Image (cartoon, grey):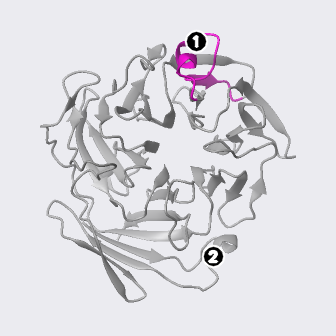
Amino acid sequence: MVVVVVVAGALLAAACGPDGSQEVLTRVGGPSRATSTTSTTGTTVAVPPPTTVPEPAPPPATSTTMAGSGPGVDDPGATPPAPADAGPLRVTEVARGLDTVWAMAFDPEGRLWFTERGGRLTRLGAPARQVGGVVEEGEGGLMGLEIDDRGRVFVMYTSATDNRVVRLEPDDSQTVLVEGMARASIHNGGVLRFGADGGLYAATGDAARPELATDRASRNGKVLRLDPDGGDVQVFSSGHRNVQGLCTAADGRLLATEHGPDRGDEVNVLRAGFDGGWPAAVGNGIRNYTPTIAPAGCAVYDRDLIASWRGSMFFTTLKGRDLRRLTFGADGSVTGEEILFDGEFGRLRAVAVAPDGSLYLATSNRDGRGSPAAGDDRILRVAPG
């Protein structure tokens, strides 16, 4: 696989760099991967080849674990077959100069929208809109974003008193769908996703209070199912530490990514009544990661532009600083994993599939834990080269 990155000529106007500089990156990858090189204004820097799981913390150790025969099992000796190669890819920078992009969504007209944690909601190419009531503190702020087939916009954010999910109305007012979830500087959850049943699913974190995940009186540490028209709130699943990604497979399964503590990051299939096991247990997913990689946003590829990707689950990683692609068998088990862009763009937060079949990624290098490069944070478009 050959990947070429170029800076698009028409970037988001408010986010373009003042010097008009361009960055071109060429990376050789695929089954027999060679050392990468990054070229920026004539300087060449070696980049580790994307063949292994990155080492998130000392002592160094290569993680090649795959889910074993049952939930919560990691098999360090397993080497799953690599998914089919998508061929040459081109990565284009479409927006830069952003600050902690948290979520992305496409509206019915195929236009990209995104949130920034400080409270800005933007449609690509249009002026940013400040969402009222957002308070950014630690990991809290403007987080999840979803848009329904009627063009209605839903967001999840941290206020001065709680975490809440609202529908944004055309007159800038807000219709609150659920409120009162405990807020904290960490573990706010925050992701939104429409399910195959038309419900709006919202993931809440445990707000650094693990006992809330099993407390039936609390909506923290849960995945909630909301009526997008308002009025009905149900606890769909519980026992969660900090779900950071929700996505829907073609067969209607609701997939989730979740942060473990110092071990046991998870990819899960959620069903009504599901118990994630936190805080008594971690690493109960269909795919688990130790050392942790901090999996974040996810999307299931449901287009035909890249046929070998169809049905795959993509998810970004913050600590791992890469994009992962999982493939599934007929029984829903994980059959393969591919690692893309290993360390090349830093921390990656969000991923979305565009109507044309391209893939959009958002960096998260300005979130307080990253090392921002020139132009960060950025939104990148991945398409066949």
Q: Amino acid at mark 2?
A: Cys
Q: Residues within 10 Å of mark 1 (few under 14, many from 20)?
A: some
**Position of residue 326 measured from the top left corner of the image (x, y, whole percent):** 30, 42
Badge nearest the viewer, 1 or 2: 1
**In the displayed image of the protein, which residue is found farthest to the top?**
216
Say which residue appears at 20% left-offset and 28% top-offset: 68
**Pointer 1 or 2: first along the chain:** 2
Say which residue appears at 44% left-offset and 56% top-offset: 357
Q: Which quadrant of the figure has residue 182? A: top right
Q: Which quarter of the rendering shows the N terminus?
A: bottom left
**Position of residue 305 measured from the top left corner of the image (x, y, whole percent):** 37, 57
Q: Which residues are magenta?
A: 208-228
| Residue 293 included in the magenta stretch of the image | no
**In the drawing, what numbered circle is on residue 155?**
none
Q: Which quadrant of the figure has residue 192? A: top right
User: Which residue in the structure is indicated by mark 1?
Assistant: 215
Q: CA distance from mark 1 to mark 2?
A: 47 Å
**Position of residue 25 measured from the top left corner of the image (x, y, whole percent):** 37, 76
123 shown above or below 144? below
**In the drawing, what numbered circle is on residue 16?**
2
Q: Amino acid at mark 1?
A: Asp
Could one spot residue 301 in this view of the protein? no
150 sits to left or right of 43: right
